[in-house]
Image (cartoon, rainbow, N blue to C red):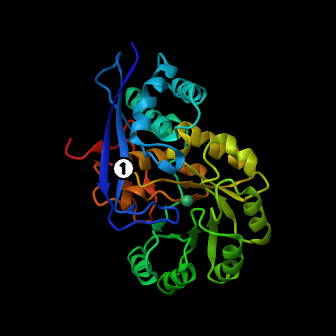
Amino acid sequence: MGLTLASETLSLPLRDPFRIARAEPGAGTRITTVIVEVRDDRIPDVVGIGEGYPDRFYGETPETMAAVFPALLEAIGSFDATVDGLIAADHRMERAIRGHGAAKCAIDVALHDLVGKVQGVPVHVLRGLSAETPPTDFTLGIDEPEVVAERARRAADFPALKIKVGGPADLATLRAVRRVYAGPIRVDANTGWTRHDAEALLPELLDMGVELIEQPFHARAYRDLGWLQERSPLPIVADESCVFPEDLEALRDVVAGINVKLAKCGGIGPAYRMLVEGRRMGFRTFLGCMEETSVVIAASAVVASLAEWVDLDGCLLLENDPFEGLELRPDKRWRLSDRPGLGVVRKGT
Ligand SMILES: [Mg+2]
């Protein structure tokens, strides 16, 4: 008696090349993500769909995920298909093994979908969360400034753009984007700047009306992050520095904001805890994603009402999302499903 899991690794092409400052050479044209189906053998007809995006930067691959799935299921033990059961599963996975956010995310998301379907309610209703969420921004990877500007022109109907920076053309790129896009610009250096870069760029970013600066320095460079936040009227947002709930304490009085992602922290349960606790501690909250299918984007949208800023565009970056059911409204807010569970199904099923 218990939970069983089947997993499938997908390699999916991206719509546009997507490069970030700390990308490995050759990365940026396809992504790898792991889809899981979880069943409780007492209710074998109900399938919970989950997804975890393995990122080598956080120490995960499809192989590490496959290796820890059995240990995580064993830690959960006998599963109660209720909200209390979900909360217990979250804590048991957290205690069972440190890290492995994507593996935990895949299971946590699948269990939420499963419980929603068993109880006949959408997941956000199950967790007592609002369907009113901030609109998502749209992210553009590093490329030639004119190429990025052309993509910005195509994404002009989004209420904010997130621009990847962390190279010699940063200023030229941001100026080129600013010429074609009047809305808020969020810059993400993915650990690619030095103090010198940041100091030189800051007045220009203020001039251009940039809204926030994400992860300028290395993940553990707390002193540098605090140094910049002291000088910057713009909020500095920690992403690579902010992975698990326990990271919040080290970032207190260092940066103004935190970027929470399901793939980093381990799914809906830990993301909910991080957003609630982060707000209580006075952080401004950003909810982000990886280049995932609409399974994780639908799961992220469940907690989006707890965030001030939302960057949930992963499935929009894919050439062909293998799932359907999640709808982006014209105002770029995700429409949370009114169907039981997450409301996403594999295309063609
Ligand atoms: Mg980031």
Q: Residue furthest front?
A: 25
- Compare residues 211 and 306 and report the one nearer the observer: 211
Look at the picture and state if 32 lies above or below 211. above
Image quadrant assignment for residue 70: top left
- Residue that badge 1 annotates: 32
Assign a secondary structure to mark 1.
strand
Look at the picture and state if 85 lies above or below 247. above
Q: Position of residue 299 (x, y in %)?
A: 45, 44
- Compare residues 218 and 320 and report the one nearer the observer: 218
Residue 16 in sight in this render: yes
Residue 303 in sight in this render: no
Mark 1 crowd level (few <14, some 14–19, many ≥20, 10 Å Cα): some
In the picture, which quadrant includes the N terminus?
top left
Q: Quadrant of ligand 1?
A: bottom right
What amino acid is at disc 1? Answer: Thr
Residue at the location (36% across, 49% down)? 32
Image quadrant assignment for residue 332: bottom left
- Compare residues 130 and 115 and report the one nearer the observer: 115
Residue at the location (51% across, 44% down)? 59
Look at the picture and state if 140 lies above or below 119. below
Q: Position of residue 314 (x, y in %)?
A: 42, 56
Q: Position of residue 75 (x, y in %)?
A: 52, 21
